[in-house]
Image (tube, rainbow, N blue to C red):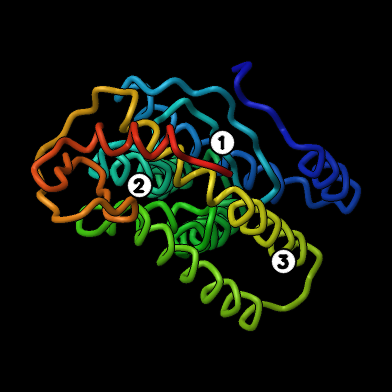
Amino acid sequence: MKLIKLDITTYLYIILFFLCGNYKKILLILFITIAHEMGHYILFKIYNIKVLSIKIYPFGGIITTNKLLNFNPNKELIISLGGISIQLLLYIIFYILLNINLINNYTYNLFIKLNTSLIIFNLLPIYPLDGHIILNSILNKFTSFNKAYNITIISSFIFLIIFIIYNNFKINNILIISFIIYKLYTLILNLKYIKNKFLLERCIYELPYDKIVYNKKFNKDLFMINKLHYFNFINEKKYLNNYFHSYKD
């Protein structure tokens, strides 16, 4: 699939693992990672979300799409669980392969160890892992987009610190931690843009809403996904139009 691209660090990992004679481990990691991303990809296709690229790193993948920020939290939650669901299915597949003697006990036990580790890692509520998206999706069902994002950023830092304390400083863990820190840094740099993009989508698109919310005064931090807001009984679009016309960076 042309959408799937390996990061340069992944190529380096493949070379290093093959030189060390540990090719089976890196091949299993790549297989599990690609299978995981295919779980997300299938659900994106089901929900008619265009996937622009799938980049594979030595410790996971990143999917780029044209999905709006004002995306249904229930669908977002289902998509975020798609990768882990495929990994759970792999347990059954590898068990069958073991029992029909297509793989040996070493390969099976190595798969179990790697697959379980990747599932646990992906469930951590740290940006940009699936756990972050799961937490953010749940929060967006009950609170504003702004507050949900702030909570998930705080949780990312807390669980990253726990991850650093818990894990030793092998080269693989150093690369993972460095990558997460970099992604968190870029997220914080772009946070103002993200929040304004969220509001701008509400201003220019006709989005589906499942509930009307009435507020006394306009506050750009109150907007919730899937909720149509009225401020002093005036539709949110009027306030958002005024906001963006008067907006100064």
Q: Nearer the viewer, residue 118 or 100?
A: 118
| Number of numbered discs visible in the structure rendering | 3
Question: Label 1 belongs to which residue?
Answer: 34
Picture disc at residue 81: 2
Question: Vertically, is 33 above or below 201?
Answer: below
Q: From what the image shows, is residue 159 above or below residue 222?
A: below
**Kind of element beneath mark 1:** helix
103 sits left or right of 211 in the view: right
Task: Tell me, yes or no, whether the two marked residues, 3 and 1, touch with CB atoms within 8 Å.
Answer: no
**Where in the figure is residue 107, as x and y percent of width and height?**
60, 51
Crowd band around label 2 with a 10 angstrom C-alpha radius: few (<14), some (14–19), many (20+): many
Q: Position of residue 200 (x, y in %)?
A: 40, 33
State the residue at coordinates (69%, 51%).
25
Q: Looking at this view, name the residue that lies furthest to the bottom.
A: 165
Q: How many neighbours does mark 1 have within 10 angstroms: few (below 14), some (14-19), or many (20 or more)? A: some
Judging from the image, what secondary structure is the residue with disc 3 in? helix
The answer to the question of whether label 2 and label 3 lie on touching residues, with beta carbons closer than 8 A, is no
Q: In the picture provided, is 161 more to the left or to the right than 6?
A: left
Q: Which residue is mark 3?
A: 173
Task: Give me the C-alpha separation between circle 1 and circle 2.
Answer: 15 Å
Q: Which amino acid, mark 3?
A: Asn
Q: Residue furthest front?
A: 246
**Could you tell me if residue 92 is visible in this image?**
no
Q: Quadrant of residue 201?
A: top left
Q: Amino acid at mark 2?
A: Leu
